[in-house]
Image: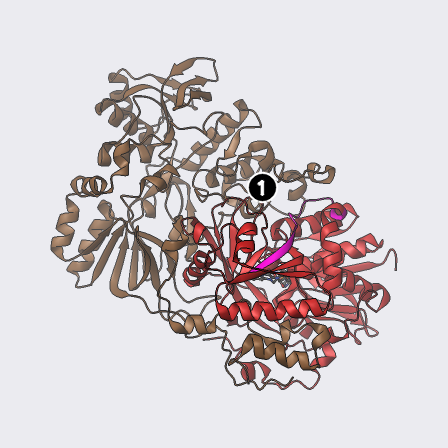
Chain colours: A red, B brown
Amino acid sequence: MSGAEVIIVGGGVTGLSAGWWLARSGVKVTVLDKYIVGWEASGRNGGGASHYASPLFDEEQRMWPQMDELLGYPTEHQKERIIVAMTERQWEQYRFVAERHTRLNHPVALLDTKQVLDMVPLASEKAYGGVHYKFGGHANPHRTVQAYAWALQDLGGTIIQHSPVTGFETAGGKATAVKTATATYGCDAVVVAAGPQIPQLMAHLGVDIPLAAARAEMIITEPAPMMPLTGVDGHKLYGRQTMRGNLAYGGGPHEWLDTEGDGPAARPSTPLARNLAKRLAELFPKAAHLNVIRSWAGVIENSPDGRPIIDRLTSPDNVVVASMSSVGFGLSPASGHAIRDLVIEGKCSFADIDILKLARFDGLEADWREKRGWMPLS
Amino acid sequence: MELNYTGTDLCAVNGTRSAPEMRYDVIVVGAGPSGIEAAIDAVKAGSSVLLVDENPVSGGLMGNDVPLYFGGRMTAATQQSERMLEAVFMSMPALESAMDAGVELQLGTTAWGVYRNGPGVASLPEQVVGLADSERSWLVGFERIVLATGARDLAIAFPGWNQPGVMGAAALQMLLTRYDAFSGRRMLVLGSHDLALETALLAHERGVEVAGLVEVRAAPQGAAELVAKVVAAGIAIHCGHVIASAKGGIDGVESATLATGETITCDTICVAIGLIPSIELVDAMHGPRALEPMRGGYVPAGEANVSAVGDCAGLADTGFDHIAYRMEWMQALSNVSADDTIICQCEEVTRADLIGVQPPHYLPRPPAMCARSLETLRQDGPANPDQIKRLTRAGMGVCQGRRCRDQVAMLLALESGVPFGTIPLATHRAPVRPLPLKILAEWDEPAAMDAAWDVWFGMPPAWVPHEDIGTRHEDAHRQMLYTGMYE
Ligand SMILES: Cc1cc2nc3c(=O)[nH]c(=O)nc-3n(C[C@H](O)[C@H](O)[C@H](O)COP(=O)(O)OP(=O)(O)OC[C@H]3O[C@@H](n4cnc5c(N)ncnc54)[C@H](O)[C@@H]3O)c2cc1C
């Protein structure tokens, strides 16, 4: 479909990666975002890229080491990850996951305390041990978002910011145009990758997408001495040491929210920063004196089973919807590829992603949010 | 695996948060004259009142130019916390009256965040302010909060400003009047509006030699009587001039060179171009604020339970447009300084890197990257300081952007050719002061918090490897990772 026009709604990592992949195939893409690219979850996350539970995992792992080169801009991608156990219970759980990796031939090694300290000098001497994933890793979300956007432009694609999409035009079972308050963009295909706003947008097309939005928080410290391995999770925290040295960490309870059609009015962080600080000081006691210099929050959507929805609709049949269900940063090089395939070929070429189809929620009970306790507080 | 959902998400934040340790009707942040007055008024009106002030801050924080731009010109006396505490008391006799009136006073106590329910958050049991001293942090509930946080120094870059000896007027005044702990001997002052004139006179009075004032505009800017006093003291005002660079050695500044080539010997260069109302807390709590050029910058717009007094509410309006004045300085200093002048000291971001939206030097700059700039970014939309911060790291350092955030906004306005007021205010975030992990940590958190703690959402199906879905491994996975959470 070279020369065709694809409109992408949402300039987060998912929409931008899809746009980049499509542009690489010679498709003319336009990305519309309500504000600035990466302003929502895509610029507020932990940067982790080790999603072994996903059918997109192999592609995620194949792509990341090449991304800087392919995009032409630095993403700060760093390889590998260590998960540090601070309690016996965590050690049991992390080992269990490691065993499962071994079973699936993902390279992992169990580490004793000394080995953990060699690779993660800031870690606690009281650590029970760790698991070294010789795969996965992390990147800088801010740089990655902008790298996709710039790379897409370098291939002739267009980014239009400050333009919330308000609806669609359809004809003959197809979406023919995407509308904003000030313009109508004709198209041959549409990708809806608008994060928590997907349900509202898809409602305009008469399609029900079950998603619930939630807020999650992170904190960051001033720079610490660089550790030999910077992708360090554990003690029920996720995060990374940035290439500058800062420790950026999240985890812990989330808050379910109403989704506002025009996006979150605010993304407040809360005193949860104190609970994050406690765990981070326990994980890295040698960094406990370091100053926390910011905290922030981001809003992400989850599907009823917590797995992404990546699907091409049957009607209108030129619309692909992509919600990454709160694990979309790391998977973005792969989700973009899958979306490109769905748009151009109608099928993912490199993995079986049927478990990500929307149809799995056919017959979902109307009160699925209540049943799960995913209702916003009021 | 069929999960039997119970209607409760055990990993949601609901009900996990601790209650505040204490509650007061009114909390006043900042024990300057207006904060003390507000506290006494509130107590007289029958309220329970807590008055907190971060001063004296630790020597370490002062070294990071928090909360004011101390520029490394404090004496060793600032390391003695007892002496510093005493100095705060001695310099503020009204504190005694406030305590006599029944105000509860906590010095050396920072208010680092204000939290309340609103858009995007409904899980807070009540509105609280986060406090911290040198030992720990805690939360305090309130009905009404009064922000009397004062104003902070505006810094503007010139070659050599990133060394000890370049400092702000508010910091200098505090070192001189409150702590008697200023280590400089001979000082050049930038600016000639009231702030600069008052600072020069104060320094002169306290035995600091004032080598002169430098004023970008053609004539002195401040009140005529202050100008007269400065002139009478024999202090030169170099009008129509800017500083071109500062040279120095191991102890920092040794001389300043004006754009005319004239060199002035001094160990301190006091940037007295402007003060900025300290609205970090208001902004971090998503409170409304408005730009008031005659009052020094953004000021709180006011709400029923949140009020601002003193300089935090805006500098006294004397009809002087502080923004226009600063912009003139920024433009003039940019004109005479090289592109490699550092703008963000913490992250060592130069003006060229800022305007080029280039990443830090530890990252590669391939050809595509080098071809990008503010100009190409602006084709996608107006310049936003938070986006520039993400890309260049300007403002991401341990001083929390105190030294560069205002300059970055001014440069973006100048480079974009748009009014300063169209550049969004870069976001302030809690903790609004750097706080060590071990201090910020809630060490005695409620058991409910730990019980709800999962690394990410605690949704069993989300983390079952896709190959295991529908196999016996799926159940083992849930049992191992989520025992007790789901039946
Ligand atoms: C604190 C936190 C930590 C996280 N950690 C990780 C991690 O370590 N690893 C990981 O892989 N994932 C992580 N995530 C999840 C990850 O950030 C998201 O899954 C991912 O960014 C989703 O990207 P997206 O492009 O699908 O959606 P978004 O980033 O939400 O982007 C959607 C875009 O659509 C735009 N939009 C919405 N409505 C409209 C409209 N009507 N018109 C036009 N545009 C619109 C928005 O402005 C936005 O830019 C984390 C998330 C958070 C909040």
Q: Quadrant of ligand 1?
A: bottom right
Q: Is residue B6 above or below residue B208?
A: below
Label 1 sits on what residue type? Thr
Residue B60 image-quadrant placement:
top left
Looking at the rendered image, the quarter that the N terminus of chain B falls into is: bottom right
Residue A62 image-quadrant placement:
bottom right
Residue at the extreme top: B262
Q: How many marks?
A: 1
Q: Give the residue at x 75% y 45%.
A: A69
Is A76 covered by the magenta stretch? Answer: yes
Q: Is residue A201 visible?
A: no
Neighbor class of circle 1 (other Cα within 10 Å; few <14, some 14-19, many 20+) is: many
**Residue A244 position within the rendered picture, expressed as x and y whole percent measured from the top left:** 55, 44
**Front one among A83 and B18:** A83
**Residue B349 position within the rendered picture, expressed as x and y whole percent measured from the top left:** 55, 36
**Residue A250 position within the rendered picture, expressed as x and y whole percent measured from the top left:** 52, 60
**Residue B422 position within the rendered picture, expressed as x and y whole percent measured from the top left:** 53, 45
- Residue identifier under label 1: B392
Q: Chain of mark 1?
A: B
Q: Is residue B296 visible?
A: yes
Q: Which residues are magenta?
A: A70-85
Horizontal side of residue A14 vs B54, given as left or right: right
